[in-house]
């Protein structure tokens, strides 16, 4: 999995524009996208714990990312959870509008476990794996 922080900003307007550009650049068949928020986005998506250094493919935390994330874009950061929740909700709405069925977000966002420290909004991007 690639981790892309080139778009990382504390300005929600710049992050929104970056989200739009990323989706437009990757528009096409078999693309999948999911917006999320976390204080540890890489761990959230891969479920790799530093102590064990290997992914966990069972259990609750990793279940929504088993489709195969190729790139994780870290888009926005803030110290304030409520701001992150609002940005996540806005980005999910936008993603659903521009990506349609390629958006894997089932809910409107803004939930999740509370954490301490810097909160991040990220975009997980991957491709639908062909059936064998």
Image (cartoon, helix red, strand yellow):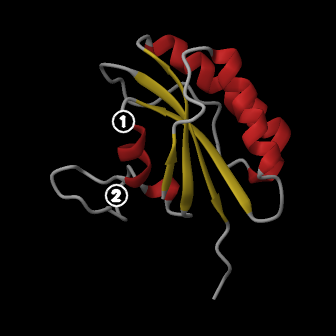
Q: Give x and y (percent) for residue 53.
A: 23, 58
* Mark 1: few/some/many CA within 10 Å (<14, 14-19, 20+): some
Q: Is residue 17 left or right of residue 80?
A: right
Q: Kindly identify which residue carries mark 1.
A: 40
Residue 17 in the image: above or below residue 31: above
Q: Is residue 74 left or right of residue 23?
A: left
Q: Indicate the quadrant where residue 67 lies.
A: bottom right
Q: Is residue 119 left or right of residue 15?
A: left
* Mark 2: few/some/many CA within 10 Å (<14, 14-19, 20+): few
Image quarter (top left, top right, bottom left or bottom right) of the C terminus: bottom right
The residues tagged by marks 1 and 2 sit, at their Cα atoms, a distance apart of 18 Å
Q: Are marks 1 and 2 in contact (CB under 8 Å)?
A: no
Question: Mark 2 or mark 1, which is nearer the start of the sequence?
Answer: 1
Residue 126 in the image: above or below residue 116: below
Q: Indicate the quadrant where residue 97 lies.
A: top right
Residue positioned 55% across, 28% down in the render = 8
Q: Give x and y (percent) for residue 121.
A: 53, 29
Question: Hey, which residue is sitting farthest front in the picture?
Answer: 6
In terms of depth relative to the viewer, which is nearer, 59 or 49? Answer: 49
Q: Kindly identify which residue carries mark 2.
A: 59
Give the number of marks.
2
Q: Secondary structure at mark 2?
A: loop
Residue positioned 77% across, 37% down in the render = 21
- Of badges 1 and 2, the one in the foreground is 1
Residue positioned 32% across, 62% down in the render = 55
Residue positioned 31% across, 19% down in the render = 117
């Amino acid at each position: 999995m690639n981790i892309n922080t080139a778009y990382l900003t504390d300005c929600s307007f710049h992050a929104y524009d970056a989200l739009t550009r990323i989706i437009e650049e990757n528009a096409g068949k078999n693309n999948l996208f999911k917006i999320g928020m976390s204080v540890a986005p890489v761990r959230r998506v891969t479920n790799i714990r530093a102590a064990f250094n290997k992914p966990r493919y069972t259990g609750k935390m990793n279940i929504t990312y088993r489709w195969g994330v190729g790139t994780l874009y870290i888009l926005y950061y803030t110290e304030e959870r409520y701001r992150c929740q609002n940005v996540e909700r806005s980005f999910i709405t936008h993603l659903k509008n521009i990506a349609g069925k390629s958006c894997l977000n089932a809910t409107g966002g803004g939930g999740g476990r509370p954490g301490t420290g810097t909160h991040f909004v990220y975009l997980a991007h991957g491709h639908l794996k062909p059936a064998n």
